[in-house]
Image (cartoon, helix red, strand yellow):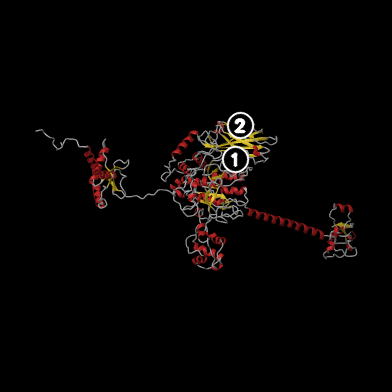
Amino acid sequence: MPKGRQKVPHLDAPLGLPTCLWLELAGLFLLVPFVMGLAETSGPDAQAPGGLSWAVHLDSLEGDREEEHLEQQADAVAQEAGLVNAGRIGELRGHYLFVQPAGPSQAMEVQSVRQQAEAVLAGHEAVRWHSEQRLLKRTKRTVHFNDPKYPQQWHLCVIGFPPHLLQNNQRSPGRDINVTGVWERNVTGRGVTVVVVDDGVEHTVQDIAPNYVSGPEPHARPMSELLPHYASALFPSLAGTEPNQIASEVGWGAFSSPVPASFAAWQLGCSRCSSPKGEDLSRTSCFLLLLPLCRSPEGSYDLNSNDPDPMPHPDLENGNHHGTRCAGEIAAVPNNSFCAVGVAYGSRIAGIRVLDGPLTDSMEAVAFNKHYQINDIYSCSWGPDDDGKTVDGPHQLGKAALQHGVMAGRQGFGSIFVVASGNGGQHNDNCNYDGYANSIYTVTIGAVDEEGRMPFYAEECASMLAVTFSGGDKMLRSIVTTDWDLQKGTGCTEGHTGTSAAAPLAAGMIALMLQVRPCLTWRDVQHIIVFTATQYEDHHADWLTNEAGFSHSHQHGFGLLNAWRLVNAAKIWTSVPYLASYVSPVLKENKAILRSPHLLEVLWNVSRMDLEMSGLKTLEHVAVTVSIAHPRRGSLELKLFCPSGMVSLIGTPRSMDSDPSGFDDWTFSTVRCWGERAKGTYRLVIRDVGDEPPQLGILQQWQLTLYGSMWSPVDIRERQRLLESAMSGKYLHDGFSLPCPPGLEIPEEDGYTITPNTLKTLVLVGCFTIFWTIYYMLEIYLSHKNVASTQGCRNGPCHWPQRSRKSREEGTELESVPLCNSKDLNGAETENRSPPTTADLLAPDLLHEGDWTLSQNSQSALDCPYQHQQPDLLQGKEEQIC
């Protein structure tokens, strides 16, 4: 019988395809929970929040297989403790993270797992150290301000706000001063004082008052002692009343703390201050009451009114808000739910009021050095007229004050003078004709709009160091800042513009630099600006890179100021060598300046021997002083070529400048050769681009002055590399600081200036003195004349000598003197002691010709003074002159 197939499958036969797929899927589903559990605990940072975990440090062994042994040991210790080894913690050898296994009973077994793990880890011989991991609270170090206008401050690189609330510089990303990262590291200008030299600072505005500089209280007494005196002076009815009762009557509330700063005193009730009778007092009356209670501002002064308070005065044009706006850009306080935020909102602010009245050279000199051991930075957003035809700057005293400030200010480190380049761009003006922007002692700052372009009002020049942001045309945004609240002001504005708005931003950024490095000198600040300013694309700018690798344009200086780069560079900066200089002899030329296309070129070679005495090697500022006679000054163009070939347009033609006086010892300067070698030939090229009559200009004389240091080009390149390495911010923390040398103890001298009021007083006193001098001289003269008149003829009638008609008509006759008719002494009449009559004393001019001879019949009212002389002296004399 044939054998049939058996239905029982053979055990060694391969499984069918469907069966394999089914088994694989089943195994996959069984492994998913296990794999998920391992995934959740794979790695030290994979532990879910809330789960238990321990950091464990195990003893390591010497040998090639140390890491493998540690891994096995960690697994064993973790298993023994009822935990899972999640792996090594970062790059720390021997450190592992043990975590609680994931499972449905995890929450129920927390306490038991902790007890078991602590017991095992504490007693295990391989565990050197262990610590249960706790959740740490950390917050992102971003700045959040509640100031309503802060989101509109596009120039600050605003962060910390939702995108739909921001109005930052989205049109040109990256076009801002990049300051918020500095704030996050607690660099806010703390400990630095910036003084605004302007038309005053309203220091009672909310955004400025807390940072307004106040000095020590001269009357360190509680307000409860001071208030009765001043309140009773204003309100006699309050005399003898208790302090708190006075406060209640006036409407302030009770207080017993020491006298606050001026802002706090204003806060006590100047917004609404009422008298005991119930009527509201004016703000002025209230201020008069509170003024003696306020501290005197330490760094401020009013040179226009000659008092310590720089409060601006209302004017007809409502224009004395300029200084207050500049102060707000620098130090407006944050998080007060008012207006905006300043660049250096932790700095102190002061004010010097000098532009609201007549300004003299002496007043300017006082302003530049006022409180220069207190004030670190002087922000000056002003200068000569920007009319395209003015050539002016600080005069002799102002120049001396600038030089003295950088030598003796800030305990010898030097005051920092920040000046605006000027707003005469629409008049084709150039800041090389501005002596403040031309000075080597100032930081000249220009402006760009929010798109990074040069605004229509901005001036260009070869002496400009850098630019920062301001307003542009009407379609672009301006700077949001504090405003005064007097007259039409509201305390906040969105319309601050011009280079006046750019200079305070630069002053604020320098304040941030001085916080991290207080011993920066005035030249250190200039160097850091040159090294860190950023060049950017602008088709209208003439960027040229000099021999030292620095790029400069006449429109933007060395580039945009960047707060992050400035502060990081300042943190690691060591001071530059001493200032070295070279001055050439006065070069007499007397050469004619031909009209374009011809030009006049003069040369001067500076040899190594010329620089040997000073040690000057590399340049900073180059100055040229010229005397030129020309019938139209604005037709001249002056260029200076450094030895490297770098060209500076130091004098541009100006269509509105028709002054026939030319230049009289005017100094042009340039910074375009910064860092280049000083040795070599300098060329001054002058061209006349005018079309006036054929009278030619004459270059009478010129002089070259070089400023720099003994740094070599290698030193400059090394410093550039060092600064770039610091731009990551790795040194910008409290743990790193370079030693600072101590400053010099320089006593501040109290200067004095003649204010207009003092001058008027002196004039009045002088006039009064002159009047009384003349009056006294006339009194003496007339009294002597009367004495001479009374000594008339006392013996016999007096006769006036006859005058000729010709002498009377010509007025050449001398004063007539009466003659006395003497008699023999033996027959002399008795002396008449009665006083002469008025008619007797009349001059002969006032008498008729017939009355010139006095009556012979009456006794003479004037006796001859010779009647008492000896007879022999009078004998034979008929008439004597009295």
Q: In the image, which disc is placed on residue 432?
A: 1
Q: Position of residue 84 (x, y in %)?
A: 26, 45
Q: Residues within 10 Å of mark 1 (few under 14, many from 20)?
A: many
Residue for badge 2: 603
Q: Amino acid at mark 2?
A: Leu
The secondary structure type at the circle numbered 1 is helix
Give the vertical position of 251 relative to 418 (above or below). below
Q: Position of residue 421 (x, y in %)?
A: 57, 43
Distance Cα–Cα, label 2 vs label 1: 21 Å
Rendering coords of residue 20 (x, y %): 22, 38
Q: Is residue 629 at least partly visible in the picture?
A: yes
Which secondary structure, mark 2?
strand
Residue 27 horizontal side relative to residue 839, left or right: left
Whether residue 188 is situated above or below residue 70 in the rendered picture: below
**Residue 415 visible at all:** no
Looking at the picture, tell me which residue is in the foreground, 726 or 50: 50
Residue 847 screen position, x and y as percent: 87, 60
Tell me the tag on residue 565: none
Q: Nearer the viewer, mark 2 or mark 1?
A: 1
Q: Nearer the viewer, residue 590 or 17?
A: 17
474, 99: nearer the viewer: 474
- Marks 2 and 1, the one that precedes in the sequence: 1
Quadrant of the image containing the N terminus: top left
Horizontal side of 726 relative to 749 (left or right) equals: left
Q: Is residue 181 left or right of residue 107?
A: right
Q: Quadrant of residue 670?
A: top right
Disc 1 residue type (three-letter)? Asn
Residue drawn at x 59%, y 46% is 383
